[in-house]
Amino acid sequence: MKEYDAIIIGSGPNGLSAAITIAREGYSVLVIEGAKVIGGGVRSDYVTAPEFRHDICSAFYPLGINSPFFKSLNLESYGLEWINPTSPVGHPLDNGESIILERSITDTAFGLGIDAESYKKLFDPLVESWPYIIEDILGPLRFPKHPIKTARFGLIGARSASGLINSKFKSERAKSLFAGIAAHATQPLDSPFTAGIGLTLNIAGHYTGWPIAKFGSQSISNALEKCLLEHGGEIETDNFVNSLEELPKTKIILCDITPKQLISIAGDKIKKKYLKSISKYRYGPGVFKIDWALDEPVPWASKDCYRAGTIHLGGTSLEIAQSEQEVSDGKHPDNPYVLIGQQSLFDKTRAPNGKHTLWGYSHVPNGSNEDMTDRIENQIERFAPGFKDLIIQKTIKTPVDMQQYNQNYIGGDIAGGIQDYRQLFTRPDWSLTPYATSTKGLYLCSSSTPPGSGVHGMCGYLAAKAALKREFNHTIKKL
C-alpha cells in the first residue's frame, strides 16, 4: 500500500484547502472522502426536477470571495466564476416595502431614513479597514497584525446584536436589516459576539458582495480539486473511514470532521485529558431546508427584492429575535426566521428557460425531525402572495436528514459547533494550537477549529500550516 506524507479525511472546503496547502509545499497527499462526490457542504445536484440545479448546503460566499487563502490559489484559473447579485440582501416588510443591503454604503443608508448618518458612521471606517482586518478575523486567537483597526472592530463586535442595533439605530428599518444579517449566527440576538458575526457579513456585503458560483456551488469544490491535482495531490471517494487503522501509512493525518466523529474514529488513540475536553464540545441548532423548483420567480410584494440574491424573512427585529430565542429554548417557531436564496435570478444555468430554483432554510432545535414546511412557506407567502401556486416540486431535509447527508452536520448543525462566546475562540478546546490533538501527527482541520464556519478554507490552511511546522519543521511563506 502506498505511503503518504499526509492523509486528509473529508473533502469539504477545509479538507481540500489543507490538502492543497501541503501538496503545494511538495509533500504527497491523499484526500479520502466517504461520499461518492467531493465537496461536503459545497455541492450542487438535481434534487427536485430534471434540469433544476440546486445548492445542497451552502450557497452564498461573502467569506469565500474574501478568503486570503482562496485568493492565493486564483481559483478563477481553475474554472470558478463568481456571480454577484445586484444587491447582497433583501429584507421585505409587511407593508409591501423592503430594506435592501446595497453594495454601496451610501445607497444602503439612503433607504434607512433617520438612521442614514448613523449607518454611515458605523460602517464607513469598518469597510475601509476590511482589507487589513480580514486575515485577523479569519484566523486563530492571537495578537492582531493591525491592532488598532482590529480592536475597533472587536470592541463593537463583542456586543450582542440586539445591544448594537438598539444603541446605534432608531428606525425599525435599520434594526430589521441588521437583525436579519446577525441571525446567521444561529444564536439568540442578545448573546455576546452576535454583533461581530453580523458586522462581518454586513461589511463583506459592501466590500465584495455575497456572490454565488456559476453552475452551482459544486464549481467551488471542482476548482479546489483541480488545484490539488495540479500540485500532485490524490483524491479517493466512496470510502468512509470508520477507524484510523484503515488508512494507508502516513506521517500526518488531518481530519475535516467534528470532535464527535474524531472520538468515534480515533478515541482509542487520544489522551484522556483531551478526550474529556472535546467530549464536552457543544453543537448548536439545526436547520430545516427546502429546495423548490418554481414555474416563475417568487412574486415578492416589494419588487426591490428581485435585485437581491439573499432574502431574509422574519419581519421586525423583535420578531427575528423572538424566533431565534425560541429555537435556542428548544422550540419550533410559528413564524420562523427564514433565509432564502434566489440564485436562478442571476445564474441562468440553474433552471430551464423561464423557470427558477429557490433555496431556503430555517433554524430549528438540534436533532429535530419536525416538519417546518408549512411554517416556512407561510413566511414566504406573507411577503410574496401567490408563491405556493408556483411550486412545481420541492425537496425537504430535516436536521436528521442533513446529518445523514453529511455526518459533519451533527443534529443538523451546519456550523460545526455553536459559535457562542464559549466556543468562538476556543474551538475545539483551550489551546494555543487548536488544530493539534493530543496525538502526535493527528490534527483537526474542520470548521470546529478557528476561525469557524463559513466557506473560506482558512481552517484547513491554518491546520496544515501548523502540522507542517510541528511535524516537518517546515514553515510556509505568508499568503
Image (cartoon, grey):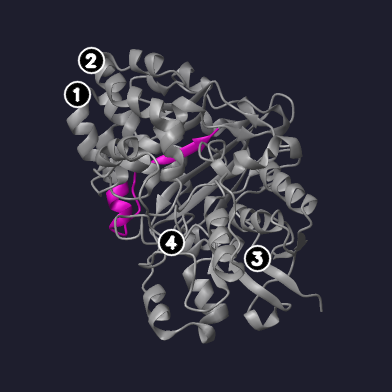
Label 1, label 4: how many angstroms apart (C-alpha)? 36 Å
Lower position in the chain sequence, tag 1 or tag 2: 2
Q: Which residue is mark 3?
A: 8
- Do labels 1 and 4 touch, CB within 8 Å? no
Q: Up-down: is 177 above or below 120?
A: below
Lower position in the chain sequence, tag 3 or tag 1: 3
Q: Amino acid at mark 2?
A: Ile
Q: Amino acid at mark 4?
A: Ser
Instruction: Let me know if residue 351 appears in the view.
Output: no
Task: Kindly state the secondary structure of the residue where label 4 is placed.
Answer: loop
Q: Which residue is mark 2?
A: 114
Question: Image point 45% across, 39% down: which residue?
Answer: 134
Q: Which residue is mark 4?
A: 368
Q: Amino acid at mark 1?
A: Lys
In the image, residue 340 lies in the stretch drawn in magenta? yes
Label 3, label 1: how many angstroms apart (C-alpha)? 50 Å
Q: Position of residue 442 (x, y in %)?
A: 56, 73
Q: Which residue is mark 1?
A: 170
Label 2, label 4: how many angstroms apart (C-alpha)? 41 Å
